[in-house]
Amino acid sequence: MASMDWLEEMHAEFEDEIIHTKSTYVKKMSQDYYWYSPVLKKLLDHHSGDCVIAPRDEEELISVLSFAYKRKVPIVSRGGGTGNYGQIVPLYGGIVLDTSKLNKVLEMKEEQATFQAGCKLGVIEKTLRKHGQELRFYPSTFMKSTLAGFIAGGTGGIGSIQYGTLWDEGNVLQLSVVTMEEKPRKINVTKKEELTKYIHSYGISGIITEATIATAKKTDWHDMIVYFDDLQSALLFSEEVSRKPHIKKRLVSVCEAPLSSVFKPLRTYRSETKATVLLQVDPDQTQEVMNLILEHGGETTDTFAQYVKNHNLRVSDFSWNHVTLWWLKQNEADTYLQGRFDPHIYLDQVRQLKACFQDEVLIHFEWIKARGKLVPSSQPVIRYTTDERLQQIIDAFEKLGIKVSNPHTYLLEEGGKDDWIDDICIAKKQNDPCSLLNPGKTKYIAEGIHEMAGEEHV
């Protein structure tokens, strides 16, 4: 069979309604936010799928997988396309599987709920809050991100200060996964050691079709912004708020000056010279937080929360990787890193970084819990000049004991979240024997990848 004959056969087998071949649309759907990285931009800009298929239900999705398997056509599953590492960029063409039409609410229970893969997290949050619940945590891109996309490509987010990350026990409760075989199997995964095979896997080990997640009791969070004359004071304040277990919080986000100056919608609350801390706290703990602000020499304003509400803003839009996005809008040549500082010596690590790189590295922290321990997680902005200089900065981070999650690679093993890579690859071998699911995103290569005639390897 000629390499692209499958496109004609696809039109004969499936309704045109679910097939998209317009080149501009296919290119758009083949991309995520990999361009945050100048390294990935150079590597991935020219890659695209050959078509997009948007199945309307699970049965149709399974039929598409079977069709692709028989013709050895690679498939990349796409959620909201809000990832940062080229997770959904097809390296070998083929089908971009748009799961956004699988968007049903399947079951709502006390402290847990089940949704189809394509449900947007923003819709899930709104639905849960109508029932007195809310997401435990979510990425800053939650209005566009889908549930399965987050699980397969994300880590944590707003709320991780209370509940940890996707890997922490009790957050992801069950997954329904479809295999890439001639007769695809549907696997129901509930055990912790099995769930890790599909979390942050870039979809290489199976297609998530349903997910059951733990939920939290709804809180009417109070938004706060706090200013400090220096970064160290901001960090010490944010650490104390984060360490007090009785202060219920959803967000503790620290930006070195002048990062918050690019938060355009906040207008008068932006600062060129002050370090800022954005908080979401339980209203019952607001007074205690105010006392801590005074103790640490900070200042705040009681008009911020109402301003956010009146302007239909979300504080989450100025935290996590949205900080990077706002910065890149005005400084498009720059980039970022991701890393976890040592909670015992993080202040010294920051001091040494600033002494070495000054404004070449702008500190941005998000306090989280991981495996039950408080962690100063960071997404610092990097003033980019060359790939070589970027690598020097990464090396400096690692030399200081900062665990870098490298956002400048599309390979799972090199991204810094590889604790379960062996398990993921075992599942891939079992569920995807011809390595047709998002091939090329891991150093693990099955024999089937060599059978993709006419495709150029990266």
Image (cartoon, grey):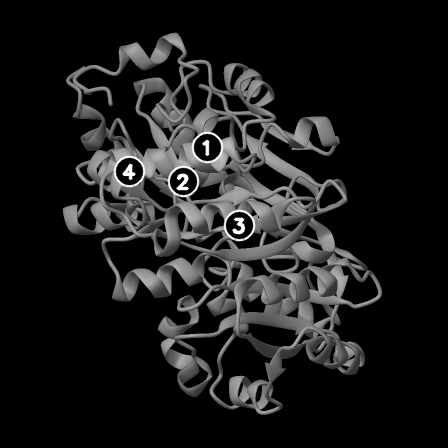
Above or below residue 37? Residue 131 is: below
Is residue 173 rendered to the left or right of residue 94?
A: right
Above or below 424: residue 96? below
- Element type where label 1 sits in the image: loop
Residue 407 image label:
2
* Residue at horizontal 36 percent and vertical 56 percent from the top: 359
Q: Estimate how packed mark 4 is, as few (under 14), some (14 to 19) or many (20 or more) residues with alpha carbons within 10 Å.
A: few
Distance Cα–Cα, label 2 vs label 3: 20 Å
Residue placed under numbered mark 3 in the picture: 350
Mark 3 belongs to which amino acid? Val
Q: Residues within 10 Å of mark 1 (few under 14, many from 20)?
A: some
As measured in the structure, the alpha-carbon distance from the residue carrying label 1 to the one carrying label 4 is: 19 Å
Q: How crowded is the residue under tag 3: few (<14 C-alpha within 10 Å), some, or many (20+)?
A: many
Instruction: Report the number of numbered marks.
Output: 4
Q: Please name whichever residue, 324 or 71, is drawn nearer the observer in this view of the structure.
A: 324
What residue lies at 48% left-to-right and 74% top-to-bottom? 274
* Callouts 1 and 2 close, C-beta under 8 Å: yes
Residue at the farthest right position = 246
Query: What residue would you read off at disc 4?
Result: 389
Measured as percent of width and height from the top left, residue 360 is found at 34, 52
Q: Earlier in the sequence, mark 1 or mark 3?
A: 3
Give the x, y percent position of residue 200. 53, 36
- Alpha carbons under labels 1 and 2: distance apart: 6 Å
Q: Amino acid at mark 4?
A: Arg
Q: Position of residue 282 (x, y in %)?
A: 75, 75
Q: Which mark is residue 415?
A: 1
The answer to whether mark 4 and mark 3 are in CB contact below 8 A is no
Between 68 and 74, the one nearer to me in the picture? 74
Image quadrant assignment for residue 365:
bottom right
> Cα distance, mark 4 to mark 2?
15 Å
